[in-house]
Image: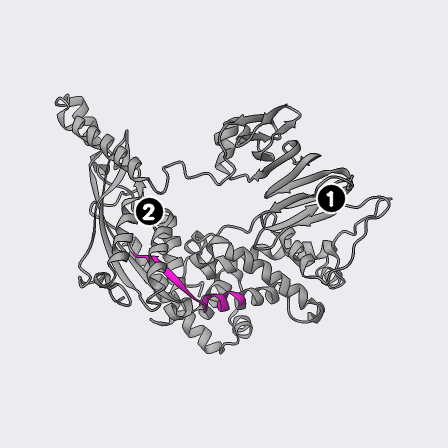
Amino acid sequence: MTDDLDRNDLDAWTVEPLPDDFDARVLAAWDEAQPSVERRPSRVGWTLALLLAAAAALAVVLRPRDERDAEAIAMRASASAQVTFAPGSDRAVQRTGTVTYVVPKGTPFVVQTPAAEVLVEGTEFTVEMLTMNDERRRTYLGAGALALGGAAVAVYVTTGDALVRNDHGGARVGPTQTAVASEHVAPRNEPAPIVAKAPRPRAPTKLTAAQRRDVQRRLADALAERRTAPPKTPDEGAAEEAIAGDLGVLQKEYIREVVAEDLVPLASECYESVLANAPDLGGRVVMRFSIVGDESVGGLVEEVAFEDPNAPQDPEAERAVPSFPLAEHPEFEECMRESTASMLFEPPQGGGRVTVTYPIVFANEAESDAASAE
Amino acid sequence: MLRTVPSAPNDPTALIVAAQRGERSALRKLVREHQGAVGGLLRRMLGPVGLGGLTEDLAQETFLRAFRALGRFDPEGPARFSTWVLKIAARLAINELARKRPRIQPDAVLVDAESPEREHDRRRVAAAIEAAVAELPPPFRAAFVLREYHGLDYAEIAKMLDLELGTVKSRLSRARRLLRDRLKGIRS
């Protein structure tokens, strides 16, 4: 087979590797699956490694050194979290993942990470180790820190307060505040909670009605201003002509990306809501929408429409897909219309309007059914 | 007193034997050595179905099943551990793809202006291959990926997936034609 296919072509299809801590996850799950053995602390002291790798979060309760009057310390960890703690020392060492700790009042507790240590007493807080690709490294630590690499951490306090410190300095963090630090950068206090996954920098996925009205108003102003602007000088005209090849064009690949990230999750919800009453429902929906925009405002979706379901399909398509019966499911059509209108794009270069025709196939079936239906 | 942790052997047979004894360093080394192949096979077979952590979950399940069955694996026998663990992964993926689930597949996007010349050719080729592979029934999807990305021969694949050798050849030949047509289409 390789005789007929170009190896370079095949190598173009690359896939993302499994996460760096995958081996730790497997071993943790392996440990979990083993028959339980009562473990007792040795005289020398023992360290119980929590390699939390279950699909769901796991809650663990630790007992501090003095159990006479202190309450337990609770801990919830993400699947990728790797934490080691020594119950006798009121100290946990977190290397990866996200862990929320609830430390009762009167109980000093320290979480050590490769980037900084967190000192608390009577605090509920979340420690999230930031991966190398996490955009928050650049956003909150700057390009210099990004270039230096190394471990980075975000500490978000829900109630109480915490001191986050490393070799370069320290920052006190109050309720609903975040501290960000790396191996090479002193902790910085950020007033906003940033522990939740950061949105794409382009734009929020879904605007509120008020936000959308505001963007539309600013867009209308910008377009009106352009229309009433004085005629361009010859030089300006020439410059604009030079980019005429791209005028009004957004790359297909980019449109696909936005649809995949913004629309498909919402469309899934639309679809699943109608599947509840009609589990065999499916078919092809062809949407047509326009993107209008201005560099200073952004690109908005306008004029969402659904094409004639009986229109001929791409003759090169290997199998025709029946049309989705939109008329019988107006709630689905409305849901799709709203979801499509909520997408935000970069504005078409040089302003203008781009009309996009986007077919989407909805099917409730196994992959094997889909593949064998050729 | 500090306890020393044995390091995992480098010899493949000794490594399996150490893993069969339950030595963590050996188990860890087996995962590290084979997670690239297992992850690659699962990602290519599952495609968008594997997003959201399913690929990682199945990769983990692959190794757990391998560890549980490790006692029955003959390190001196003809089967390689690498092939054995890929077989487990392929079967898990085939079973997963047989499950019924809502599917949303954006089709070809049409833009009413000429597409820019600087399209990323490599990404288009990759997308064409991915789309062609997605049209294969799961067992043949596994066969294609095992052949093209893991270097297994037809006989190994047929045995691994319980398929007739001739069937593997004919279906992969069909897949090859489909893929060639797609690549021709994006380059014309």
Whether A151 is drawn above or below B124: the answer is above
Residue A102 pos. (x, y %): 63, 40
Q: Secondary structure at mark 2?
A: helix
Point out the tag, 2 or 1, that comes first from the N-terminus. Answer: 1
- B13 or B135, which lies in front? B135
Horizontal placement of A267 versus A62: left or right?
Answer: left
Q: Amino acid at mark 1?
A: Arg
Residue B110 pos. (x, y %): 24, 51
Query: What subunit carries mark 1?
Result: A
How busy is the neighbourhood of tag 1: few (under 14 within 10 Å), some, or many (20 plus)?
Answer: some
Q: Secondary structure at mark 1?
A: loop
Residue A230 pos. (x, y %): 13, 21
Please tell me which residue is depicted at 71% across the width and 67% down the height of the picture.
Answer: B75
- B158 or A102, which lies in front? A102
**Image quadrant where one finds the C terminus of chain A:** bottom left
Q: Amino acid at mark 2?
A: Glu
Horizontal placement of A367 versus B185: left or right?
Answer: right
Residue B159, picture quadrant = bottom right
Query: What subunit carries mark 2?
Result: A
Residue A4, picture quadrant = bottom left
Q: Which residues are magenta?
A: B92-107
Please tell me which residue is depicted at 55% across the width and 60% down the height of the picture.
Answer: B58
Residue A372, picture quadrant = bottom left
Residue A27 pos. (x, y %): 67, 55
Q: Which residue is mark 2?
A: A253
- Determine if residue B18 is in view: yes
**Image quadrant where one finds the N terminus of chain A:** bottom left
Q: Is residue B106 magenta?
A: yes
How busy is the neighbourhood of tag 2: few (under 14 within 10 Å), some, or many (20 plus)?
Answer: some
Farthest front residue in view: A69
Q: Which residue is mark 1?
A: A63
- B4 or B57, which lies in front? B57
